[in-house]
Image: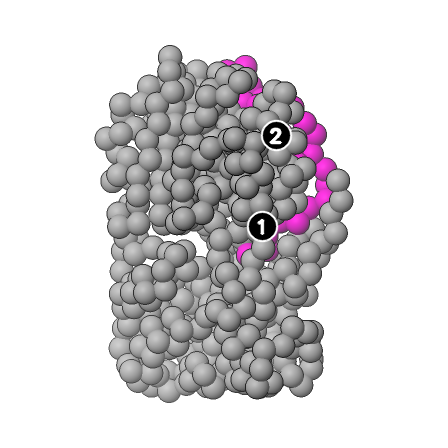
């Protein structure tokens, strides 16, 4: 997943753009980029896989002069992309995933359209989206024609002489919010970028909506619709605690998730409740509030310099981050019966090898793992995360139980079925924990506070909402 920020100000915008973009650093680990428009376009992109966005761009942003700009933290691709099109030059940043990207790229190549950016031997999705847009009669027409061609999810910002265009994908999978302060308008993936920059959230964009921000304010260029399919994982794991999507705060949802887990746990006695830093903390706080057991920190994260172990693209880097970032405190762990709350189990190797193992090695008496979402069953269709079912702990369990790969896993999705219970027991044994329990889909939906129809639950159910245009 990537995140972006855009701003139009009455004066120079570079400092606001710099800090606003930096507040998306939890969403990507590969590239960062800024583009500012004053008398001309200025653009800079850096690899941030081995350093933080702030240190890479601190000097650069001071040299970029203009009153409007866009920035991005990218999980995979170099962006912003600059295009000098038939309807004028523009820069673009995006987040999302296109399932038919290779097919669309081949179509454009047959038309004689070239690509200059390559991401790991595949087409750069942001450049592909830009080239598709240029096939329209004007910018707005090109955006709408692009949406009709893509299969997947894509939200993006465009910077041109008119201002900053914000375009939310038609499924509503990724959120976009608009903010205002006295001297500027801004748009963001994460509302946490607004608070310390002095913006108040004035609008959560609807799926398919297009707005233009300029010196005069906000202009709606295309109405959205109310058929939403926003990613549930934003609240469970991906989003920053102070962010809100559709007006619902991340931290409060995670607390409610923990409370739901504790209500189903009346049959165990524990001494300590903890969360795997950082995204498991609020789930654990909710669990502690409901269970009336003390929240403590047997595992602490060493500085914000260690990012998320989920986002790096290479498994060896993910494992190294997971190993190094958590430091155990033996005085809190030894002899304790501990509930460990975490957002999810993807592959399970990091939880087992770099979290649970540290608790056992430091004398834990019991380790009870509670997961804030159901077992992940399907790779995400709409963003960069797990790419194959073979990566998922639940699928490994099913394969071992069935002695083969199976396509129909419906019985394993039903939390009341015998097969589901066998799968959880298999994972519990593989993790080497005292007990393991997952959240139910209905409880997770209730904790989020939107209707099931307005949430993407594909990772857990394999079903996408039926959205027609």
Side of 300 relative to 469 (left or right) = left
- Residue reaching furthest top? 39
Q: Nearer the viewer, mark 2 or mark 1?
A: 1
Q: Residue at x 40, y 66 (%)?
A: 276
Image disc number at residue 143: 2
Horizontal and vertical percent position of residue 93: 47, 35
| Quarter where residue 412 is shown | bottom right
Would residue 161 be seen by someone viewing this image from the given angle? yes
Work out whether 287 lies above or below 98. below
Q: Quadrant of the C terminus?
A: top right
Work out whether 429 lies above or below 285. below
Q: Residue at x 30, y 56 (%)?
A: 306
Number of numbered discs:
2
Instruction: Write down the region rendered in magenta.
Output: 206-233
**Residue that label 1 marks:** 99
The one nearer the camera, 215 or 160, is 160
Query: Helix or strand or loop: what does disc 2 sit on?
Result: helix
Mark 2 touches mark 1? (CB < 8 Å)? no
Work out whether 185 lies above or below 347. above
For marks 2 and 1, give the CA distance.
18 Å
């Amino acid at each position: 997943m990537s995140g972006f920020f855009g701003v139009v100000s009455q004066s120079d915008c570079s400092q606001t753009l710099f800090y606003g973009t930096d507040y998306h650093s939890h969403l990507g680990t590969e590239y960062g980029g800024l583009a500012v428009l004053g008398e001309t376009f200025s653009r800079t992109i850096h690899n941030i896989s081995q350093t933080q966005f702030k240190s890479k761009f601190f000097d650069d942003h001071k040299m970029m002069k203009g009153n409007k700009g866009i920035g991005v933290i990218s999980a995979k691709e170099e962006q912003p992309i600059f295009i000098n099109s038939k309807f004028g030059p523009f820069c673009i940043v995006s987040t999302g995933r296109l399932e038919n990207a290779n097919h669309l790229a081949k179509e454009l190549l047959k038309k004689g359209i070239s690509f200059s950016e390559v991401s790991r031997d595949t087409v750069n999705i942001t450049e592909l989206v830009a080239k598709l847009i240029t096939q329209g009669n004007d910018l707005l027409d090109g955006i709408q024609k692009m949406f009709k061609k893509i299969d997947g999810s894509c939200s993006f910002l465009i910077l041109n002489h008119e201002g900053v265009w914000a375009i939310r994908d038609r499924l509503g999978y990724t959120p976009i919010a608009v903010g205002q302060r006295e001297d500027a308008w801004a748009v963001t993936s994460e509302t946490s970028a607004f608070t310390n920059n002095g913006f108040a959230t004035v609008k959560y964009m609807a799926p398919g909506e297009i707005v233009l921000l300029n010196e005069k304010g906000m202009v709606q260029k295309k109405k959205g619709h109310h058929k939403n399919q926003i990613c549930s994982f934003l609240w469970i794991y991906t989003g920053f605690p102070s962010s809100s999507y559709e007006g619902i705060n991340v931290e409060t949802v995670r607390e409610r998730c923990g409370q739901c887990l504790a209500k189903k746990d009346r049959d165990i006695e524990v001494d300590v409740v903890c969360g795997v830093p950082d995204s498991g903390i609020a789930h654990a706080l909710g669990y502690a509030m409901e269970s009336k057991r003390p929240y403590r920190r047997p595992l602490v994260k060493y500085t914000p310099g260690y990012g998320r172990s989920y986002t790096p693209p290479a498994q060896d880097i993910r494992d190294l981050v997971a190993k190094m970032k958590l430091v155990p405190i033996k005085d809190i762990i030894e002899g304790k019966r501990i509930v460990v709350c975490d957002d999810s189990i993807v592959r399970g190797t990091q939880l087992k090898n770099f979290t649970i193992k540290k608790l056992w090695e430091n004398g834990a008496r019991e380790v009870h793992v509670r997961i804030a979402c159901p077992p992940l069953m399907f790779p995400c269709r709409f963003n960069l995360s797990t790419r194959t079912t073979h990566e998922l702990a639940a699928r490994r369990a099913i394969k071992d139980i069935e002695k083969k790969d199976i396509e129909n896993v419906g019985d394993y999705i039903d939390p009341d079925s015998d097969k589901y219970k066998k799968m959880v027991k298999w994972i519990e044994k593989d993790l080497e924990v005292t007990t393991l329990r997952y959240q139910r889909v209905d409880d997770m939906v209730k904790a989020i506070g939107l209707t099931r129809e307005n949430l993407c639950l594909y990772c857990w159910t394999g079903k996408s909402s039926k959205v027609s245009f």
